[in-house]
Image (cartoon, helix red, strand yellow):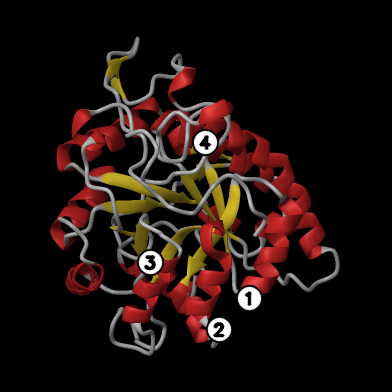
Amino acid sequence: MRNFKLALVFAVLAGFSGPPASGSGEGATGNFDGRQDEPGSMSEKTGGNGLVRSIPESDASAATPGRAANGATAPNASVESNRADLAPPKGDPARAAARPGLRLSFTDWYVPGLRGSADAAFSFVARTGLQGVEVNPEYDGNSPKLLNSPLLRQQYFDAEKSYGLQISSFCLGELWVDKLATDASSVDKIRGLIEVCRLMDVHVILLPIFADYRGAGVTDTIVERLKLVTPAAEAAGVVLGVENYETAETNAALLARVNSPAFRIYYDIGNSSERNYDIYGEIRMLGNRICQFHVKDQQTSAGLPGRGKIDFARFRAALEDINYHGWLVLELTAGEPNYKSSAEYLKTVFAVRP
């Protein structure tokens, strides 16, 4: 995530008590194919506390082994491909019938007042013409607040239902910049968020790992710690997507070392383009090993797509070549009008259905 310090400025201006701990930035071949269909939907059930919960904690079958990344039941009780030819997602009929294809989300940490507030975030999504939000959850120590607070989870469930929108993914901002390489407690933080995903029917976690991968022992430590958490991710039907500043070749080697179908690349076209990587070739090279995309153009002051050097027609062609039809997540240091105009631009380029 570039311009991270700007987030701190925005947060201070908005009266936050501190900056959002989050990250952004930008394989081993597994059963995943990198194509994001509609995540599994929420079935309404009432828990013992009277709250309507999407996936009750007692209903482990709702999002445990055998659950594919799109919410369908995967064959052989393993994390399976999320291709369009899988069975439709289960749960709420409205979400089960929702359109396939590319959808637009945004990161909640660059807009003051949205992080940690379900209604504010989804209201913003609705006003700007987006379809989802990537949530950077707040933590108490090593535990995400969403894990320990059924009420907070309920607020997100209610907002999803009220606005007819979704959480596209989580970002574990607590790992920014290189915590997975330097802090062993990062493993517990990832495990906690995997459990939140199981409870909330979310299937992608962005891991911002902007470490110096050429440093002595750095990659070894990252691989070792990822291998400690990928079994839990596989069991929960969750994809851990690493974002960094590395080339496709370096990331392919990283994927091969971790060697888990629950570990993929979260590709940021703005960060890679800024480093003069051939993003169109890299996308085709990584193919189904990409789980999701951050969308911005670093050649503009706020990252606005379509106003810098990235050729979005070529980007669209690369996505078509790898048959990607998941979330495009806007990451802009811009206000509401710029998000709205960017959403309109992307809908035109990619023929995104409303």
Q: Nearer the viewer, mark 3 or mark 1?
A: 3
Q: Residues within 10 Å of mark 3 (few under 14, many from 20)?
A: few
**Observer-nearest residue: 162 or 118?**
162
Q: Which residue is mark 1?
A: 247
Pick whichever of labels 4 and 3 is earlier in the sequence.
4
Q: Residues within 10 Å of mark 2 (few under 14, many from 20)?
A: some
Q: Residues within 10 Å of mark 4 (few under 14, many from 20)?
A: many
Mark 4–mark 1 CB contact (< 8 Å): no
Q: Quadrant of residue 317?
A: bottom left
Q: Identify the element where label 2 is drawn.
A: loop
Mark 2–mark 1 CB contact (< 8 Å): yes
Q: Residue at x 30, y 37 (%)?
A: 156
**Observer-nearest residue: 204 or 187?**
204
Q: Vertical placement of 333 versus 68: above or below?
A: below
Mark 3–mark 1 CB contact (< 8 Å): no
Kind of residue at badge 1: Thr
Pick whichever of labels 4 and 1 is earlier in the sequence.
4
Kind of residue at badge 2: Tyr
Q: Residues within 10 Å of mark 1 (few under 14, many from 20)?
A: some
Q: Which residue is mark 4?
A: 237
Question: Residue 320: which numbered mark, if any?
Answer: 3
Pick whichever of labels 2 and 3 is earlier in the sequence.
2
**Observer-nearest residue: 242 or 346?**
346
Residue 184 in view here: no
Pick whichever of labels 2 and 1 is earlier in the sequence.
1
Kind of residue at badge 3: Glu
Mark 2–mark 3 CB contact (< 8 Å): no
Q: Residue at x 32, y 52 (%)?
A: 133
Residue 291 in view here: yes
